[in-house]
Image (cartoon, rainbow, N blue to C red):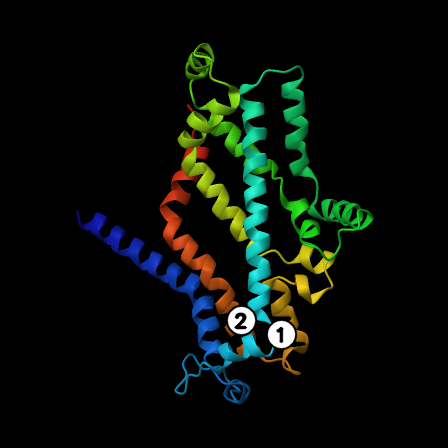
C-alpha cells in the first residue's frame, strides 16, 4: 500500500512539473504582452513578473496594423476551406468504404501514397498551378490547395467501414439511395470523428503561414500569420516584441476556446478513429 501511494505521489509530481513546462511559454507570452516597450527593453535580465501591467500593446496591434481585417480574412479562409474539405472528404471516404468499382484497392493505395510526398513538392506544384490560373491574391487561390486531405479521408473511411455491411444492404433493399444512406446513417454515426476533423482543420487553417505568404503579396488578403510578420517588420518602425506577443495572444484565444469547448469530442473522435472492429 505504501509503495502504491509513493508511486501515485511521484506520478502527480511529474505531471505537475510537465504541466508547468508546457504552460510556461503561454505564461511568458501573456506576461510579455502586458509589459510596455520601454520596460521590456530595460530588462537586462528577464523578469518573471511585472509591477506595471499595461493593455496598450493590445490597442496598438489594432491601430498600427489592420489586425481586425486580417482576423476577418482568416475567418473567411478557415470557414470556407473547412466546409469544402469536409464535403470532399466525406464523399471520398464513402466511395472508398462502400462503393464497389474496379481497381478500388489500387486507387486507394495510390491515394495513400500521396502522404509520402514532401510538402515542399506539393507547395511548388500548387504555386505553379494557382499562378497559371491567375488566382494569386484571391481567396480561391488561398482555399483551393487546402480542400483535400489524404489523412482525413483515410480516417473517415475507417470509421465508415466500422458500420456493419448488413445495415447498408438492408438500406439498399428498402430503396435508400447511397447519398441518403450516407447523410442519415454514416454521418450521424461518425459525428465525433467529423467534429474532430473539423476542429483540426480549423486549427490548421488558422495557423497557416507558408502558403499565404507565398501566394499573396496584397495586404487585402493577408491572414493573421501575415499580420504577425508585418508587425515584426514594419508595424511600429522597430521590433516591438511586447506588441507581437499581444497579437499572438489575440490570435491564439479563438483556438484555445475552441479546444476547451470540444476537447472531449476531439478525444472521442481520435479514439474512435484508432479503434476498428
Q: Tell me if mark 1 has few (under 14), some (14-19) or many (20+) residues whose alpha carbon lies within 10 angstroms of its own.
A: many
Residue 150 picture location, percent across and down: 61, 36
The residue lying toward the viewer, choosing from 113 and 205, is: 205
Is 135 left, or right, of 221 in this rendering? right
- Residue where numbered disc 1 is placed: 231
Give above or below for 83 relative to 66: above
Is 79 left, or right, of 51 in this rendering? right
The residue lying toward the viewer, choosing from 139 and 206, is: 139
Give above or below for 95 relative to 140: above
Quadrant of the image occupied by residue 104 = top right
Instruction: Name the element at disc 1.
Output: helix
Instruction: Name the element at disc 2.
Output: helix
Which residue lies at the image location 76% right of the left edge and 48% below the top edge?
130
Numbered badge on residue 99: none
Residue 121 picture location, percent across and down: 75, 45
Residue 45 picture location, percent across and down: 50, 84
Residue 221 picture location, percent across and down: 67, 61
For the image shown, how many numbered marks are present on the structure? 2
- Residue where numbered disc 2 is placed: 247
Earlier along the polypeptide chain: callout 2 or callout 1?
A: 1
The answer to whether the residue labelled 2 contacts the one labelled 1, judged by CB atoms less than 8 Å apart, is yes
Which residue lies at the image location 24% right of the left edge and 53% below the top edge?
6
C-alpha distance separating marks 2 and 1: 9 Å
Amino acid at each position: 500500500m505504501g509503495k502504491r501511494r509513493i508511486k501515485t505521489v511521484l506520478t502527480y509530481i511529474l505531471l505537475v512539473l510537465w504541466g508547468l513546462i508546457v504552460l510556461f511559454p503561454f505564461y511568458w507570452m501573456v506576461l510579455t504582452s502586458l509589459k510596455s516597450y520601454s520596460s521590456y527593453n530595460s530588462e537586462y535580465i528577464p523578469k518573471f513578473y511585472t509591477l506595471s501591467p499595461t493593455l496598450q500593446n493590445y490597442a496598438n496591434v489594432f491601430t498600427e496594423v489592420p489586425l481586425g481585417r486580417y482576423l476577418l480574412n482568416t475567418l473567411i479562409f478557415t470557414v470556407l476551406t473547412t466546409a469544402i474539405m469536409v464535403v470532399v472528404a466525406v464523399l471520398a471516404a464513402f466511395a472508398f468504404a462502400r462503393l464497389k468499382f474496379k481497381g478500388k484497392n489500387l486507387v486507394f493505395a495510390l491515394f495513400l501514397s500521396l502522404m509520402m510526398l514532401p510538402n515542399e513538392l506539393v507547395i511548388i506544384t500548387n504555386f505553379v498551378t494557382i499562378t497559371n490560373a491567375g488566382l494569386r491574391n484571391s481567396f480561391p487561390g488561398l482555399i483551393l490547395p487546402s480542400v483535400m486531405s489524404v489523412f482525413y479521408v483515410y480516417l473517415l473511411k475507417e470509421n465508415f467501414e466500422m458500420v456493419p455491411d448488413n445495415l447498408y444492404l438492408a438500406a439498399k433493399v428498402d430503396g435508400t439511395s447511397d447519398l441518403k444512406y450516407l447523410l442519415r446513417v454514416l454521418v450521424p454515426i461518425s459525428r465525433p470523428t467529423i467534429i474532430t476533423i473539423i476542429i483540426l482543420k480549423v486549427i490548421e487553417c488558422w495557423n497557416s503561414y507558408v502558403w499565404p505568404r507565398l501566394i499573396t503579396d496584397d495586404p487585402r488578403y493577408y491572414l493573421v500569420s501575415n499580420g504577425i510578420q508585418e508587425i515584426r517588420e514594419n508595424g511600429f518602425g522597430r521590433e516591438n516584441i511586447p506588441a507581437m506577443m499581444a497579437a499572438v495572444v489575440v490570435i491564439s484565444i479563438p483556438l484555445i476556446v475552441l479546444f476547451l469547448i470540444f476537447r472531449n469530442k476531439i478525444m472521442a473522435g481520435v479514439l474512435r478513429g484508432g479503434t476498428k472492429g
